[in-house]
């Protein structure tokens, strides 16, 4: 059964002392798919990923990764998994090339020189290969790390916020690369805070407070939120924002450039609120909620205050 | 005025920040008080610049009242602690070479008869002068102690023997292994052990600490490398460092200090190898305990302090109180010093060095086991 699943974990719980970081997460990720892992800061994404690849002991729960038991066979999982840490974790006092060579040796990759040469070529770092990795800019460090963790052609990629601080062009290249790898059969679980990246995934898992709140495709998740969103455009829209925030039925107010999005569970209530604040130069239309609207609504529903999260 | 006030405000801010950070690092905080206390205890109680009660052996080939008086006077003096008395020269044979005693005092057969006849018989003290400091006090006072003792016994018809002004016997002192009593003979071989201890423990204590402090540990743990592979890989470069240091120090000992090397080099090589491994394993253990490089440094220092003070490097081992000797026996440097001084100065054989070699092996095995048990396989 788990032959079809790259990750198959049930009821993962992780406690640090009294604090529960992950409170019973199930993930069934089929081979070859690209899944997004989302959730507010401190929701337990990194902790879950670390448990999946055996870097943290599981407090409760069990599961398999690539068919191996995550608690017993961590060594086998490591051999076939590429894990990119959230914080840059390559050696700053080694050159770019030395870092890649070290990884290649640890995985016993054949044709060491050629493999490293090719990786450098693909990265576009051939000319800078003798620079210390620590001297790279933030975005370049991320790109080096991604190249290093994919060098051994892992079956599963666990990427923890791989594009944090990466420029848009590089981000697009990066996602092209992910889809390319996925076509070749690689399974990817990627955590991110970017909505556009979430939309590039086959499915997304949304965590809040260590609980899985939703899982599904992007349209699924938006539908599941049960949200209605109205978009207001026009000159006076910003002046209306403060007043509308306190209206019953209006759960969230968000700015989108010069436009305003009002979201709530009951479209009728929002319409009523709008009618109480008529304005000639503002035009209101019901629009499809964005993923971001949906997440904020879902977190609020789950009782997560995303603004003051411990 | 205003500028002064705001300057003070900023000093206060930095002061508070430092105080908070200082308190948060518990180990460092503990060391700040632990190290001075240990220094006080070691320097105050353990170290004895004028060592007394040094282990000695007595070889007495005849039993007469006069000999008993002499033996009694040495026994009651505070310099000697006779751990054995025998009349068989074979039994005292290699006690000095093995370092079990610091002196062998021999009173030959026929001593009393010669003494009574005024023939000035000899009393022989063989002293292990490989540590000149340890030997000097006991040897220096022996003449006085023995002469005083005889003064009481030589009465009546024997008074003439005592009255001649000269002592009635001749005290012969053999400063074994280091006849010119050069302290460099003792210090330089010892330095080999001290330098290896300091550099190797310090370097390897950073081995894992650096990885966890810089966040690269998570990456290492996520890659397929086993704990013992990691440990060996991290330690082996420093085996080479240790070997080079040994070579440099031994050459310097020969060329600059002209310290003799009369023993078998391969025995020393064996000793150095085990000693280097012991230190590397210990440093690696420290690196699994310390959370920051700062803490690793402090642990190293914490270990280094008793190592130089209680190993017999700076101060005679046998001159220390028992509790300090017990601690000393647990330190690899103590055993290494016996090996290196034995081989270089005394031509000690492998069989004679069996005990320190086994002690080093046990220490290494324990350190490796602790390191493996403490090695973090996960980030917990
Ligand atoms: N080693 C640890 N000891 C104690 N608590 C921890 C530890 N690691 C994580 N936590 C706690 O567990 C919770 C989940 O943290 P985690 O890093 O998994 O969140 P995350 O979803 O990755 O957040 P972010 O988006 O900010 O990266 C947090 O509240 C964090 O404080
Ligand atoms: Mg995280």
Image (cartoon, coloured by chain):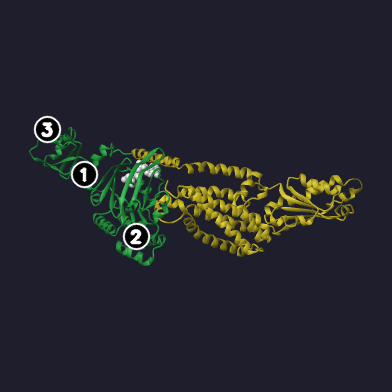
**Which of the pair A15/B286 is nearer the observer?**
A15
Q: Is residue B379 above or below residue A271?
A: below
| Secondary structure state at the residue bearing disc 1 | helix
Are the residues flagged by discs 1 and 3 in contact, CB closer than 8 Å? no
Q: What is the drawing colour of chain B?
A: yellow
Q: Answer yes or no: do the residues labelled 2 and 3 have beta carbons within 8 Å?
A: no
Query: B263 left or right of B194?
Result: right
Mark 2 packing: few (<14 Cα in 10 Å), some, or many (20+)?
some
For mark 3, does the 10 Å Cα neighbourhood hold few (<14), some (14 to 19), or many (20 or more) residues? Answer: few
Tell me the element at label 2.
Answer: loop
Graded by Cα atoms within 10 Å as few (under 14), some (14 to 19) or many (20 or more), the crowding at tag 1 reads many
**Quadrant location, the C terminus of chain A:** top left
**Is A203 on the left-hand or right-hand side of B15?**
left
Residue A153 - label: 2
How far apart marks 2 and 3 lie (CA) works out to 60 Å
Q: Residue at x 19, y 37 (%)?
A: A265
Residue A156 is left or right of residue B331, and the answer is left
Give the chain letter for green.
A
Quarter of the figure with residue B191: bottom right
Residue closest to the eye, B110 or B141 = B110
Q: Earlier in the sequence, mark 2 or mark 3?
A: 2
| Mark with earlier residue (1, 3) | 1
Tag 2–tag 1 contact (CB < 8 Å): no
Q: Measured from the top left, where is residue A263 in percent x and y?
A: 18, 39
Give the alpha-carbon distance from disc 2 to disc 1, as whole Å. 34 Å
Q: Which residue is mark 3?
A: A276
Q: Earlier in the sequence, mark 2 or mark 1?
A: 2
Q: Residue at x 66, y 48 (%)?
A: B49
Residue under label 1, please give it. Answer: A222
Nearest the eye: A224 or A50: A224
Chain name for mark 3: A
């Amino acid at each position: 059964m788990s032959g079809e699943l790259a990750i198959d974990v049930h009821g993962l719980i992780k406690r640090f002392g009294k604090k529960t970081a992950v409170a019973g997460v199930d993930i069934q990720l089929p081979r070859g798919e690209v899944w997004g892992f989302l959730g507010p800061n401190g929701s337990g994404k990194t902790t879950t990923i670390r448990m999946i690849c055996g870097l943290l002991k599981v407090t409760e729960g069990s599961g398999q990764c690539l068919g191996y038991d995550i608690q017993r066979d961590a060594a086998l999982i490591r051999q076939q998994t590429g894990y990119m840490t959230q914080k840059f974790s390559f050696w700053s006092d080694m050159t770019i090339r030395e870092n890649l060579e070290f990884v290649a040796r640890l995985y016993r990759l054949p044709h060491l020189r050629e493999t490293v040469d090719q990786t450098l070529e693909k990265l576009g770092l051939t000319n800078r290969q003798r620079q210390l990795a620590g001297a790279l800019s933030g975005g370049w460090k991320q790109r080096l790390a991604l190249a290093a963790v994919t060098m051994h052609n892992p079956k599963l990629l666990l990427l923890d916020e791989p594009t944090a601080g990466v420029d848009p062009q590089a981000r697009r290249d990066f996602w092209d690369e992910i889809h390319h790898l996925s076509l070749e059969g690689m399974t990817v679980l990627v955590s991110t805070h970017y909505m556009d990246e979430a939309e590039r995934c086959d499915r997304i898992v949304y965590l809040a407070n260590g609980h899985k709140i939703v899982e599904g495709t992007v349209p699924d998740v938006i539908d599941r939120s049960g949200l209605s969103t109205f978009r207001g455009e026009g000159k006076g829209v910003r002046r209306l924002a403060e007043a509308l925030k306190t209206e019953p039925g209006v759960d969230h107010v968000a700015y989108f450039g010069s436009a305003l999005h009002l979201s709530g569970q009951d479209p009728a209530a929002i319409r009523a609120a709008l009618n109480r604040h008529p304005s000639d130069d503002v035009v209101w239309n019901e629009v499809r909620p964005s993923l971001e609207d949906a997440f904020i609504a879902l977190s609020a529903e789950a009782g997560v205050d995303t603004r003051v999260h411990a | 005025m205003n500028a002064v006030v705001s300057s003070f405000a900023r000093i206060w801010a930095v002061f508070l920040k430092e105080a908070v950070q200082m308190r948060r690092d518990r180990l460092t905080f503990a060391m700040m008080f632990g190290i001075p206390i240990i220094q006080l205890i070691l320097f105050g109680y353990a170290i004895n610049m004028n060592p007394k009660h040094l282990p000695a052996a007595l070889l007495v080939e005849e039993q007469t009242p006069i000999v008993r008086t002499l033996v009694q006077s040495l026994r009651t003096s505070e310099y000697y602690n006779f751990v054995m008395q025998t009349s068989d020269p074979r039994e005292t044979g290699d006690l000095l070479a093995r370092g079990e005693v610091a002196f062998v005092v021999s009173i030959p057969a026929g001593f009393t008869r010669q003494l009574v006849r005024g023939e000035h018989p000899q009393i022989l003290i063989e002293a292990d002068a490989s540590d000149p400091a340890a030997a000097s006090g006991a040897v220096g006072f022996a003449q006085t102690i023995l002469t005083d003792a005889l003064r009481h016994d030589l009465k009546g018809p024997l008074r003439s023997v005592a009255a001649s002004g000269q002592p009635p016997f001749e005290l012969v002192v053999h400063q074994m292994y280091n006849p010119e009593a050069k302290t460099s003979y003792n210090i330089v071989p010892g330095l080999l052990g001290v330098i290896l201890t300091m550099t190797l423990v310090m370097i390897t204590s950073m081995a894992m600490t650096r990885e966890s402090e810089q966040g690269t540990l998570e990456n290492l743990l996520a890659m397929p490398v086993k704990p013992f592979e990691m440990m060996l890989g991290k330690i082996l470069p420093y085996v080479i460092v240790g070997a080079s240091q040994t070579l440099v120090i031994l050459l310097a000992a020969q060329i600059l200090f002209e310290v003799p090397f009369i023993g078998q080099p391969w025995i020393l090589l064996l000793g150095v190898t085990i000693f280097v491994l012991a230190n590397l394993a210990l440093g690696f253990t420290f690196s699994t305990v310390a959370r920051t490089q700062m803490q690793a440094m402090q642990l190293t220092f914490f270990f280094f302090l008793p190592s130089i003070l209680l190993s017999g490097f700076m101060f005679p081992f046998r001159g220390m109180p028992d509790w300090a000797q017990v601690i000393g026996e647990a330190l690899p440097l103590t055993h290494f010093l016996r090996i290196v001084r034995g081989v270089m100065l005394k031509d000690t054989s492998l069989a004679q060095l069996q005990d320190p070699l086994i002690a080093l092996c046990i220490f290494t095995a324990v350190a490796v086991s602790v390191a493996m048990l403490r090695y973090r396989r996960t980030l917990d």
